Amino acid sequence: MILFKYILRNHAAPFFFSSFVLIGIFLMQFLMKAADKIIGKGLDTWVIVKLVAYNLGWIVVLVIPMAVLVATLMAFGSMAQNNEVAIMKSSGISLYKMMLPPLLASVFISYLLIEFNNRVYPDTNHELKILMQDISRKKPTLSLVPGVFSSEVPGYAILARDMDPLSNRLFHVTIYDNSNSKQNNIITAKEGNIYFNYGQKKLILNLKDGEIHNYDITKKQSYTKIDFERHKIAMPGEQFTFQKGSSSYRSDREMSAQQMQVEVDTIQAVVDRKIGLFNTEFNRYFTIDSLQNRTKNKIARSSQNLFIRVRDNLTFAENSLKRNARTITQNLISKNNYLVEIHKKYTLPVACIVFILIGAPLGTMTRKSGFGPAAVISLIFFIIYWAFLIGGEKLADRGLMTPFWGMWSANICLGMLGVYLTVKSAQEKITFDFSFISRLIPKKLKNLNSYK
């Protein structure tokens, strides 16, 4: 039991360390890609925090299996480098027993990740979609430049010849009000200030000492001039503030496996009904008996227009069958998409177990304990795994492979490789030399050997 705790403790620090590092890398990648969509929007700090938090959903799903592989390589590489694996083997403890604690831990992590995929991940994806839609609708904050007309507010053109940006005071203001299609208003004022109302849905322009020149387009020679000491204009300001939207529609990546299974059952019922209609239509028009019966009936009624009538009926039947066939095909594609996402919610968590089978023997063979070698080897296997997964997903979506094999082929192939490596490593019949990797690793990563 003490030995098992020791092996798990060797895994814990590298697991948490690699998880935080990989999460940071993925977050930086996302922020760099989304920078052009969020910079200059004047977003509140809390909105940015929620944006990062919602993106942690898909990041955690990708990072945890990779962190398990990195931690396993570092832990077993460190124990092999310090001859602890050799000492345990000489004491009668096989590699299989050494792998038992991390294997049990990976099963527990897989269970937690499955629960996360079905309970947390769909909601974070849904909220992220809504948040990104709200951010994309928000325009940058209203910017007024002295001496330049601003047309950012719909229906208004605002000119301030001078302004104090600290107090939002405007001087020598001219406003063209075109919000009413039947009237043209020109408003001038010596000074004023601009601010949002309490609900931040209106942009208020408070003016002092000015004039309103009104011209009614519908009435000829209709001109009005009004002098004022104080005058307020309420302009639409929703486009300059962040408004939380909502959406009830959820795509496949915003549903749990149970919710998608309901959709699959519904689609299958539609497909079965359409196939029944297809068979009925086909038997009605294109079997030999039906053609003979319909031909006899047509001859009995009118032999003169027989060809035209038969042609029209066959054309109608062909179009009906094509419509049914297209509907069946589209529904089958949609069903495959849901099934692919259902399997994906389980394949990535199970990859944690597969990566233990690969990482433990590779760690003992390579005898490298640093984060750098472990990260490079993990990246190689994760790229192979991801290529299998993406390729299988594309083939399954197109109906060229069943969703099961499309999603589970990566786990099955790498799992078989892991079992092979584990057996060969336990028998000490195979070793690998990854010394060439050290030449590709930066010096800073080579020094990260204390996390074990």
Image (cartoon, helix red, strand yellow):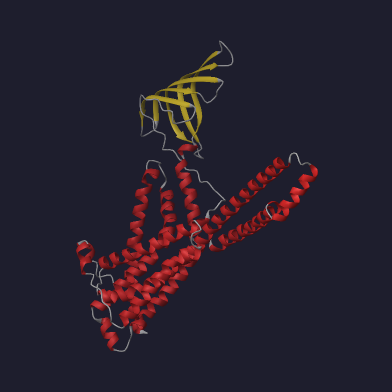
**Quadrant in which the N terminus is drawn:** bottom left
Q: Nearer the viewer, residue 450 or 358?
A: 358
Determine whether 398 is above or below 110 in the image: above
Residue at 36% over, 73% down = 417
The answer to whether 274 appears left or right of 305 in the picture is left
Q: Position of residue 117 (x, y in %)?
A: 48, 63
Determine whether 268 is above or below 219 in the image: below
**What is the count of numbered marks?**
0
**Quadrant in which the C terminus is drawn:** bottom left
Q: Nearer the viewer, residue 185 or 405?
A: 405
Q: Position of residue 364 (x, y in %)?
A: 28, 77
Determine whether 6 is above or below 56 in the image: below
The answer to whether 270 appears left or right of 391 in the picture is right
The answer to whether 40 appears left or right of 236 in the picture is left
Q: Position of residue 180 (x, y in %)?
A: 55, 24
Residue at 64% over, 59% down = 272
The extreme top residue here reads: 221
Residue at 36% over, 55% down = 27
Q: Nearer the viewer, residue 204 or 26?
A: 26
